[in-house]
Amino acid sequence: MLSAEQNDRITRTGPDKPVGKLLRRYWQPAALVDELNGERAIKPVRLLGEDLVIYRDDKGRYGLLGRGCPHRGTDLAFGRLEDGGLRCAFHGWLFDTEGKCLETPAEPDGSNLCRNIRQKAYPVVERNGILFAYMGEGAPPEFPHFDCFVAPDTHTFAFKGMIECNWLQSLEVGIDPAHTSFLHRFFHDEDPKQGYGKLFRDTSIDSEMPMTRIMREFPRPRIEVEPTDFGLRILTLREISAKNTHVRVTNLMFPNAFIIPMSREMTITQWHVPIDDTRHYWYAIFTSFGAPVNKDEMRRQRLELYELPDYIPRKNKSNNYGYDPHEQEHDTYTGMGADINVHDQWACESMGVIADRTQEHLGQSDKAIAAYRRLLRQALDALDKGDRPPMIFDAASAKTVTGPAAIDGIGPTDDWQGYWQRTDASKRSAATWANGR
């Protein structure tokens, strides 16, 4: 259990809150590139409790500005993208991507007013379909050389979805290996050939055993947590027999992302990014180590469940997440369909908009959650002391932070550590874009 004060400290994300200050020291997803690829390359966003507008100017540069014009507060989301910037539709004030006021055209000739005007602005960079923003103090950190960032565009796909609760609930579900045996339990195994783009539909590496069967039949995993230079490595072991053990390697990328295997060839890197304290988006980059990603199919599958323009889930609290008691009796553990994002959404949202951790009782299966909370508290303590929080990389250190391994396979019980390392090396050597790294 945590005290109410401790829970507040690790959940609240406003500019003046401890976690809010911490998250701002890292690049955070702000929008998908796809969101600016329509007729109008501008979109209002709310990020970490701040109302902003993200856009691509007429020279192809990305900007993230405060939403209210500093003249008289009108909405820059309705501005004009012209003349190298974003122009307010009220009096024509023009701002560049750095927030500099370039013109105040209604003022008299020779006016110096714009020289003293500065709009709130944050730097934006694109990485494989996601626009990342840096909202913190000082120079932004370098991106680690993770697979999702260095893979070519042909082998990645980005998407997002809204969840109506605090960000930490979803992150903790993502690093909880035990819940998959229950929340994502399927009573019947699908043909893996029909499972493209879906989590837990493949067979584990070095076996013909479907992942769904493993999760269903071996619900008491042994969980090991190891510190890494990017956060935590989580090793989940399910002993199939005296000779063979199912090994699943997942990762916590500090402060608010995780990396997991989706199938034999594909991994998911997923961030949980606060809109404010009671809503957040998950952003994901799917990375293929095999064939190029079928982006059209991946997008089609997900748009069946999410409604544009704001990526709102079609199954949600208002319709009981599609719950069907007959399905719960015969097909799935939740009765909420076959997409695990819906299962996770229900689990996260049903805790309340901010989970009351004063009432929880953690067990041995929550080892990774306890380890993450310790890491988070240590980072907050460092920030309080004026020290640099962990996992902030400069150019030299970022090059050394690669991978990480995300594996789901069945190997020898007496050498499971060696097994996942060899399997990761083999996967990389077979990938056209990764075998030279």
Image: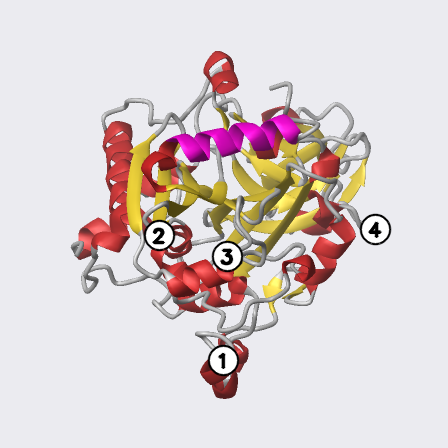
Going from N to C along the chain, the mark reached first, 2 or 3, is 3
| The N terminus sits in image quarter | bottom left
The crowd level at tag 4 (other Cα within 10 Å; few <14, some 14-19, many 20+) is few
Q: Work out whether mark 4 precedes mark 3 in sequence or the reverse, and give the earlier one.
A: 4
Residue 39: which disc?
4
Q: Position of residue 41 (x, y in %)?
A: 76, 45
Could you tell me which secondary element the residue under label 3 belongs to? Answer: helix
Q: Nearer the viewer, mark 3 or mark 1?
A: 3
- Are circles 4 and 2 on residues that touch, CB within 8 Å? no
Report x, y in % for residue 127: 64, 33
> Label for residue 211?
3
Can you tell which mark lies on residue 241?
Answer: 2
* Mark 2 neighbour density, 10 Å: few (under 14) some (14–19) many (20 or more): few
- Looking at marks 4 and 2 on the same chain, the residue that comes earlier in the sequence is marked by 4
Q: Earlier in the sequence, mark 3 or mark 1?
A: 3
Q: Which residues are magenta?
A: 418-430
Q: CA distance from mark 2 to mark 1?
A: 39 Å
Residue ID at (38%, 49%): 175
Q: Is residue 94 left or right of residue 245?
A: right
SS for callout 4: loop
Q: Which residue is mark 1?
A: 320
Q: Of helix, strand and loop, which one carries label 1?
A: helix
Of residues 57 and 193, the one nearer the viewer is: 193
* Residue 131 covered by magenta stretch: no
Question: Measured from the top left, where is residue 131 in percent x and y?
Answer: 63, 38
For badge 4, the amino acid type reads Glu
Front: mark 4 or 3: 3
